[in-house]
C-alpha cells in the first residue's frame, strides 16, 4: 500500500491509516493486521487478525485510529 503522509504541527502524535483501511461492522471499527502466510490445498494465503479500534479525527483520506489498551502488534 502506498502512503502519502500529511504533517500538521499541532503537537499531537497519532496513528493514522487510509480511511478505507478501517472497516465498520455492527457499530464497531476494525483494522486487519497481517499475521503470516499459510498454505491451504497447495495455495498460499495471507492470514490476518481483526483488531478492534476506535476512530479518531479524520483529515482528507486518512483517519486516526486509537487501539485499545493492552494491544500488542506481535
Image (spheres, helix red, strand yellow):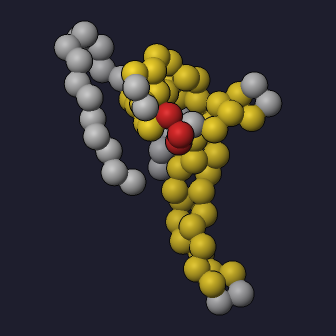
State the residue lying farthest toward the top: 10
Q: Residue furthest right?
A: 26
Q: Position of residue 57 (x, y in %)?
A: 46, 16
In the rendered view of the protein, which quadrant contains the N terminus?
Answer: bottom left
Residue 42 in percent (x, y) is at: 65, 89
Q: On the picture, is 31 further left or further right than 27? A: left
Residue 3 x/y as whole percent: 32, 44
Q: Residue at x 23, y 18 (%)?
A: 8
Q: Is residue 57 above or below residue 35?
A: above
Residue lying furthest bottom: 42
Question: Can residue 68 be spotted in the picture?
Answer: no
Q: Nearer the viewer, residue 50 or 20?
A: 20
> Residue 53: image x %, image y %?
58, 29
Q: Is 1 situated above or below 61?
A: below
**Residue 33 visible from this viewpoint:** yes
Residue located at (64% from left, 46% from top): 50
Q: Nearer the viewer, residue 16 or 52?
A: 16
Hey, which quadrant is residue 12 in on the image?
top left
Left or right for 17, reference 50: left
| Residue found at the very far left of the displayed protein | 9
**Would you place residue 63 above or below residue 42 in this image?**
above
Q: How many marks?
A: 0
Q: Nearer the viewer, residue 21 or 46?
A: 21
Amino acid at each position: 500500500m502506498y502512503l502519502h503522509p500529511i504533517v500538521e504541527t499541532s503537537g499531537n502524535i497519532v496513528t493514522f491509516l487510509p480511511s478505507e483501511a478501517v472497516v465498520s461492522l455492527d457499530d464497531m471499527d476494525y483494522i486487519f493486521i497481517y499475521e503470516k502466510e499459510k498454505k491451504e490445498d497447495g495455495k498460499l494465503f495471507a492470514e490476518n487478525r481483526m483488531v478492534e479500534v476506535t476512530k479518531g479525527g479524520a483529515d482528507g483520506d486518512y483517519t486516526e485510529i486509537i487501539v485499545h489498551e493492552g494491544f500488542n502488534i506481535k
